[in-house]
Amino acid sequence: METKESKEKDSGQPSKEEAEEGSSGQQAESEHADTEDTLEYYRDLVEKAESVAKLDDWSYVSMELDNIGHRWDEGPQYTNTDLEEEGNELFEKFQQICDDFEERRKKHYEELNKKKQQNLERKKELLDELREIVEKEQWKAENKVKRIKKEWDKITLLPKDKGDDLDEEYQKLLSTFDEHKVDYFASRAQREEENLQGKLLILDKMEELAESIDSEDENWKEIHNRFKDLNRQWKKIGKVPKEKRGEVWGRYKDAQDKYNNRKYEYDEIFRKKYDKHLGKKNQLIKEAEELTEFDDIAKASSKVNKLHRRWKKAGNLPQKKENELWKRFKKATDAFNKKKSENIDLVKQQEEEHYQQKLKLIEEAEEVKETDDFKRGHDKMQSLMKKWKEIGPAPHKKSEEIWQQFKGAMDYFYDRRREHRRKEKERQKENLEEKEKIVEQLRELGDHEDPIEAVDEAKKLQKEFKDIGYVPIKQKNTIWKKYRKACDVIYDRYRAAKRGEKSVPAGKKGRMDPEIRSKIRNKQKQVGKLEKQVKELEQEVIQFKETRTYFSARSEEGNALQQEIEDKIENAENELEEKKDKLEDIRDEIEDLKEQGRKDRESEEQEDRETEEESDAESEESADTSNKDG
């Protein structure tokens, strides 16, 4: 017997179980397809929201996001709970997009409101400026008002209901300004026409004055004052009409040139001054033009600033010539600066070379600073300073550091030298006291009862005086005068005593050995030469002391120059004292020669007297014999 199942099988129809199983599979496939379509729907909404949220059209974006939100709410439901989690993630992403946009929109409107408030404040400031112009009646401030109008019109965004009152006041002020501006410009045009007539009148006088100069005998002071007064009047007069300015200015420059040309032709003082200034400035231009030929660009660059400083001190020329020369000078310095900028790497290399050279000078200064030969040390330090200045600039970052090192070595040396001089001055004070004592002894010898013996004593004291050594510079002349005065008294009494010692017979006076007389004349020539040298040295010392007063101790260079002058003063005064000592020695030698001549003459006179006495005796004896014979 066939069963139902075998019949279904045989008939080719699916069994019940197979039919149920097939129906279940078809339903699952349909549900899966529905879920994928739903997710794709929401993915599209998220993608569209992302795209729209990037725009800056705030109203449009808000509306579009609202529409997308509405479509989201009306969208299909999930039929598969397993995929609901992904759907929730899509919704959270959409919500974040909306939140981010709202935050961005909020920030935008905050910035917009802030900008509106700033615009409002700026309009208030512009209104204040315009109000001040009107209240102060500054009717010629047209450019300022134009600027205010231009900026006012650009400001459009303002807080709601905040700009109407400002605009109303602005228009009133602007109308007031425009009304008065017309009157002002009419008045200004009239003034400019009056100014034109005034300047033309002055130009006539300038041209007439220049034409009148035709002789070297002019009263230049009066002419200068007249022309200066005309220039003063010219500058005092205001503007002329714009269309006449070029013509008037051209006549003014021509009048200036004509005046200066006439002065150059006839005024010798002006011509010398002009040529002097012209020569200086042409020399500066030449030096500036030569800068581009320097291989050491870094060193040349340090000369540019010096040239500019020298240009300012070179004196002024008539304006036309001054402008012409300045253009040439500036062109030359600009050419060098261009070369420097094009070779900046080379400049850095040269500055480094200068740096190394200056380090060597620092080493030399460190060696010299301990020397006790202060004269040689001073000369060496000055030589190093000169080399330092000639080397050229070092890198800027290192320049101050090495200068302080170099200056430190110099300061150390000169501090030691000052201490040495301080001690030397103390010794000189002691020497002065010793010389004062000798001068007092010489004064006492001036009253000695035996003038000849006084000279012998004085010579010993004179030697002691000369052997003592230097005294303070300020006291040198004073003690020397005291010394000479005391010595003069002694030797005057000595000469007077010698003259009155013997009565020389007539015809015998003044007789002296020719050799001694020749020596005396030679010595007197030396005295004359030394006296001339002494006067020259005294004048030199005075000049050095005057020069010293021009220096101040406010700079290192000023200190060095002042110290150099002090050294010259000291050297000159030392040489002066030596010359005076030598002069005194020669005078003493002359006195000794004269004394020797007097002694020789007295000896000769004594012999003559003895011969005369013998002759007289013989004559008397002969007379007696004759008498006896008689």
Image (cartoon, grey):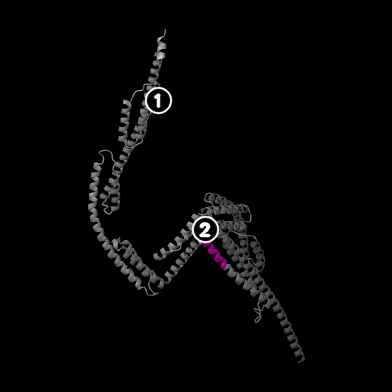
Q: Is 292 one of the magenta-colored residues?
A: no
Label ID, residue 407: none
Q: Secondary structure at mark 2?
A: helix
Q: Going by the image, does 171 lie left or right of 16?
A: left
The quarter holding residue 425 reads bottom right
Q: Residue furthest top?
A: 1
Report the amino acid beneath label 2: Ala
Q: Closest to the observer: 64 or 530?
A: 64
Q: Quadrant of the N terminus?
A: top left
- Residue 438 shows in this picture: yes
Question: N-terminal of the two: label 1 or label 2?
Answer: 1
Q: Is residue 105 above or below residue 299?
A: above
Query: Picture quarter containing residue 160?
Result: top left
In the current view of this chain or complex, which residue is farthest to the bottom?
630
Q: Quadrant of the C terminus?
A: bottom right
Residue under pointer 1: 86
- Give, as a single range, the part of the protein colored magenta: 536-547
Q: Is 551 situated left or right of 156 in this image?
A: right
- On the image, the x and y values in percent for residue 53 come to 35, 34
